[in-house]
Amino acid sequence: MKITISVIKADVGSLAGHHIVYQEQIELAKKILEEAKNNGLLIDYYVFNAGDDLELVMTHTKGESSPEIHGLAWNVFKEVTEKVSRPRKLYAAGQDLLSEAFSGNVRGMGPGVAEMEIEERRSEPIIVFAADKTEPGAWNLPLYRIFADPWNTAGLIIDPALHQGFVFRVLDVIEGKAINLKTPEEAYDLLALIGTTGRYIIERVYRADGLLAAVASVTRLSLIAGRYVGKDDPVCIVRCQHGLPAVGEALAPFFTPHFVAGWMRGSHYGPLMPVGLKDSRCSFFDGPPRVVALGFQLAEGKLIGPADLFEDVAFDHSRRIALQMAELIRRNGPIAPAILGPEELEYTGIKETLQRLASRFKPEK
Ligand code: F6R
Ligand code: MG
Ligand code: MG
């Protein structure tokens, strides 16, 4: 039986500024998804938060981009906005709902989406990663390391099933085009693209034999809206074990935190800090950007779990390193390389300042 896992998320308002999803929002989302489960639309669901983002994990048999499933998610975000965010005057109520009316698919309407339709294996461990205060390009580095770097993933050398390599589907979000690149053969071509995280984003990874291994959300709100609307706070689903990277290999890149774009006002570089659910809330300078990893076993589409994978003392070490990185880069305040480059800041209020100052620039003597 084919099962689809749909992770659809949106920031529809939060408690204490952009800090955390409010409990009543989670409860209402659960109530609506429970009804959908009782009606037979969903097999199962799990609701959680990544900072101020409401995350819906749903399993069903409707396939990817199903209008029914997307409509359900849209309805959850609308209801939560109208029944909780607005009456409680939560901050930025309905922020990510960029359209008034639903038109069959939430893609391009604000919410982030990662979906995969798979034939469930004899045992099917998956990880749902969800980040706050960053953008989809934040997954480029970990996805490369998980599926192409033998220093990270021992299975690439040891397990014949991984040894054939992986195919990365990379989106150019500026041009709206996609390219497939195969590792290890085209590893350098792949790296030449994905270093530019604001433009080239890994969307899917397949094993050489075609098995779908990972899917990431690629929405860039600023490109949809043409202005700054908060960061996209991406999600990603990774299948693990038995001929795919082990759970521990999928988590390994996060042991040594890397810098990502986002953080305060979506305009700064900061370390991506792996945290358990209890710490999934951005505080210091609205950050640092955080990622949670929830492990599930699928059982005929039922979500067994989750295991809160970063809630482990091993990652205390990574959190300390992330905070040191945060402290160091914050010393630069508003000066590069702490702030994003001009092509990214273009979507922020800085644009107005540059326009206002333009006429005051005179030729240099
Ligand atoms: C970043 C983020 C926050 C806000 C910041 C200002 O993704 O959500 O850092 O950008 O708190 O928010 P406003 O402009 O709503 O006051
Ligand atoms: Mg927010
Ligand atoms: Mg957020």
Image: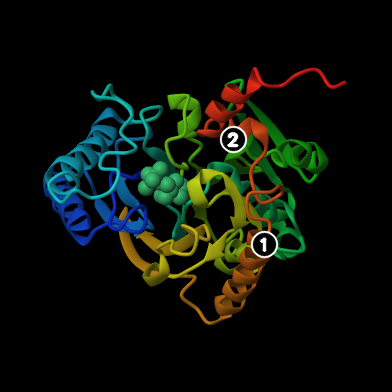
Q: Residue lying farthest right?
A: 365
Locate residue 67, reporting x and y percent: 28, 28
Label 2 Cα neighbours within 10 Å, binned few <14 / some 14-19 / many ≥20: some
**Position of 353 compared to 8: left or right?**
right
Q: Which residue is mark 2?
A: 345
Q: Give the number of the mark in front: 1 or 2.
A: 1
Quadrant of res 109: top left
- Identified at 24% across, 32% down, the residue is 71
| Sequence-first disc among 1 and 2 | 1
The disc placed on residue 157 is none
Image mark count: 2
Judge whether 61 appears above or below 139 on screen.
Answer: above
In this rendering, position of residue 112 left or right of residue 77: right
Q: Position of residue 273 (x, y in %)?
A: 55, 64
Identify the residue position indicated by label 1 in the image. Answer: 331
Which residue is painted at 30% across and 33% down in the image?
97
Quadrant of image for the C terminus: top right
Q: CA distance from mark 1 to mark 2?
A: 20 Å
Nearer the observer, 197 or 207: 197
Looking at the image, the residue that sits furthest to the bottom is 313
**Amino acid type for the residue under numbered disc 1:** Arg
* Nearer the observer, 295 or 177: 177
Q: Secondary structure at mark 2?
A: helix
Residue 59: x percent and y percent? 31, 48
The amino acid type, in three-letter code, at marker 2 is: Leu
Q: Is residue 244 visible?
A: no
